[in-house]
Amino acid sequence: MGLAACLGAAAAVAPAQAADGMVSVELNKLEATNNACRAYLVLQNGTSHAFESLKLDVVMFDADGIVARRLAVEAAPLSTGKTSLKVFDVDGLACTEVGRVLLNDVLTCTGDGGALDGCIDMIEPASRTDAPFVK
């Protein structure tokens, strides 16, 4: 295996890294639980803001592109330079039914200095699951 292939393989398994000024939000895992789908989000704060609230408007679509669920997910607190794991259950939805996940909007975005503007533009969604996570 050549050096480029090795580096590409290493990058494929490396955790999401937030670019300067960005918050990476990675859909890391979908796990079946009793009558629910448990979602794991890995967040990395590459901004200069310590978020006191970062409430995400998340929409899950089925394999046919039909809206299956819409939820508000609180991803804060999230300190500057911090990596964090947020876990939430989506009741009544099988993980195998999730075809795509959309970051529709940011409902609330506050830092230590109050409300922040342009938070949706600071977020870089990514997915390690079969379901793409997009905005």
Image: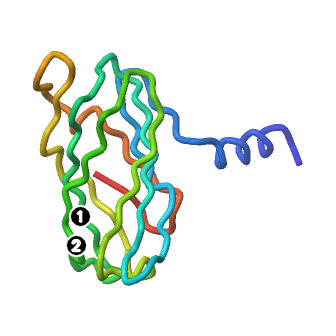
Q: How is the image coloured?
A: rainbow
**Tag shown at residue 69:** 2
- Asked if marks 2 and 1 touch (Cβ < 8 Å), the reply is yes
Q: Nearer the viewer, residue 5 or 16?
A: 16
Image quarter of residue 87: bottom left
Image height of 49 relative to 66, above or below: above
Q: Is residue 125 left or right of residue 73?
A: right
Query: How far is mark 2 from mark 1, CA to CA?
Result: 6 Å
How far across and down, in percent of the image, does residue 65 sit? 27, 77
Residue at the (28%, 51%) spot, across then down: 135
Image quarter of residue 124: top left
**Tag shown at residue 124:** none
Q: Nearer the viewer, residue 127 or 43?
A: 43
Residue at the (58%, 42%) spot, across then down: 15
Residue at the (19%, 56%) spot, across then down: 72
Name, please, the residue furthest toward the right: 1
How far across and down, in percent of the image, does residue 109 sit? 17, 34
Name, please, the residue furthest toward the front: 34
How far across and down, in percent of the image, does residue 68 sit? 24, 77
How far across and down, in percent of the image, does residue 103 sit? 26, 53
